[in-house]
Image (spheres, coloured by chain):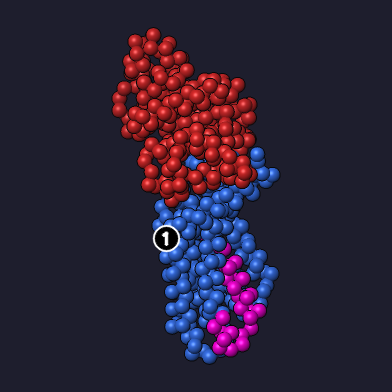
Amino acid sequence: MKTKRPGLASMLAIYRRELLSYVTTPTAYVFAAVFLFSIGLFTFQIGGFFEARTADLSAFFGFHPWIFMVFLPAIAMRLWAEESRSGALELLLTLPCPTWSLVLGKFLAAWTVAAAALLLTTPLWITVNVLGSPDNAAILTAYIASLLMAGAYIAIGSAMSALTQAQIVAFVLAVLISFLVTALGLPLVLDFLAGVIDGGAAEALARFSVLHHFDAAQRGVVEFRSVFYFATLIAVCLSFTALAVDARRGG
Amino acid sequence: MLLQVDGLRKAFGRRIAVDGVTFSIDVGEIVGFLGPNGAGKTTTMRMIAGYLEPDDGAIKVFNIDVVQERRRAQERVGYLPEGAPLYGEMTPWSFLRFVAEARGMTLTAARHAVRRAAQDARLGDSIDRPIDTLSKGYRRRVGLAAALLHDPMLLILDEPTDGLDPNQRHAVRDLIRKLGEERGLIISTHSLEEVEAVCTRAIVIDQGRIVADATPQALIEKHGDLERAFAALTRQEERV
């Protein structure tokens, strides 16, 4: 007996298996611990959460792009590289599943791990509510934007993972690309670019950076443009992943 | 016709792995693929299973073109890849459940299919232990069970008895014989004795081409025994 939507059923099966493999191996726990530790370190030591004496989480969210940039490629690096190294890719590609169901199932599993790590930071949210009265709607918005941004970084990691058999190569490539996509909006890079190319062009380029779109959301403004930006980034990277996986059939 | 392969060709860069392979298989046939390492056996099987795309030629499973309608064809094929890659951190039970669900079976159907395939492949009571802790022979049988899950009419088994001890090999051969009664099977093997014991037909491949396609008995009659037939038909020098 078959389900009515085989593609969807395959995706769910892949998603469950991938998630199971995250929780039964130590990787996810190690990374979640490192993530929480570093986000705490940045927020309290460098961000000066208490010294700022304001009831908001800007010190916390401000570091997300930088921590995600390293943390999420580490979560995503095994998605495809490990399959081709172990030979299990052959198993997946001989199942009657559409490629998108494999790509999406794996991506969603890694995204769920990121979401769980993000969820573990909510005590901070509770803390600011105990200490003062923050704008909770703005914080919620920032959380949603952060989750979307995490999806984008994982999609980049998934695309790089599909290119190689070596997890470490996938990791380094993903960090590099994530850095470029993030830092385009940094004043440092912007000033440099403005010196080389037309200021207007540099400004336009900056609009394509993760920082540009995350900054707006951090202030509590949901912009359709930013949601669209992250969704597009995810879609482009996942399409690339599917192409790279399908290219394996060519031999 | 269960399987029709016509003029199959595949090259990796400059190296031609499969060079114009043509054959067909009917229900009740157990075909043994023989040939030296690097002859193109695995590449041919991978193309039939829909893992690799051929450069040229056609593969039809029940008249369904594997390249044009890959997923429909794959629904009808059971495939055991070389070395039986599995997910080591899973148990055979959860692994087989995963394969059944990924194949689009409903939860109830998946549970039944796993129980039946586990029984056919004689997985016994180690079904709840992590695959990483199991013996090579047992893992091979888990791979075999995964290939049997959807009760396919065509089974492609790449070295199903490689690395098994004599008892396990015997059990797998019995299973292959039983499966072959109402299905079509292709098995690749380096054991000539195995071809004699289970196969109704032997296809000898060398340098990407079929150099013989006959019953094991016909090959024995012609060359004295299978070992001599193999030596006479395939290139002798060691290849890297």
What residue sits right under mark 1 in the picture? A26
Hey, what amino acid is under mark 1? Pro
Quarter of the rendering containing residue B5: top right
Query: Which residue lies most toward the front here?
Result: B125
Q: Which chain is blue?
A: A
- In this picture, is B238 found above or below A238? above
Front in this rendered view, residue A228 or B184: B184
Subunit ID for the residue under disc 1:
A
Q: Quadrant of the rendered structure where residue A107 is?
A: bottom right
Colour applied to chain B? red
User: x%, y% of residue B223?
Assistant: 36, 11
**Image quadrant occupied by the N terminus of chain A:** top right
The residue lying at 66 percent from left, 79 percent from top is A137
Residue B181: x, y in percent? 53, 21
Q: Is residue B133 visible?
A: yes
Q: Residue at x 49, y 64 (%)?
A: A72
Give the main secondary structure, helix, strand or loop, of the magenta stretch. helix
Q: Residue at x 42, y 15 (%)?
A: B216
A32 is higher (above) or lower (below) than B147:
below
Specify the segment rendered in magenta.
Answer: A126-154
Q: Secondary structure at mark 1?
A: loop
Residue furthest to the top in view is B221
- Would you say residue B142 sits in the magenta stretch? no
Counting from the top left corner in percent of width and height, residue B163 is at: 35, 34
Which residue is found at the position 60% from the left and 66% from the top?
A148
Residue B168: quadrant of the picture:
top left
Tally of marks: 1
Between residue B140 and residue B118, name the one nearer to us: B118
Q: Is residue A61 left or right of residue B202?
A: right
Task: Report x, y in % for residue B89.
Answer: 43, 51
Q: Residues within 10 Å of mark 1 (few under 14, many from 20)?
A: few
Residue B104 in sight from this viewpoint: no
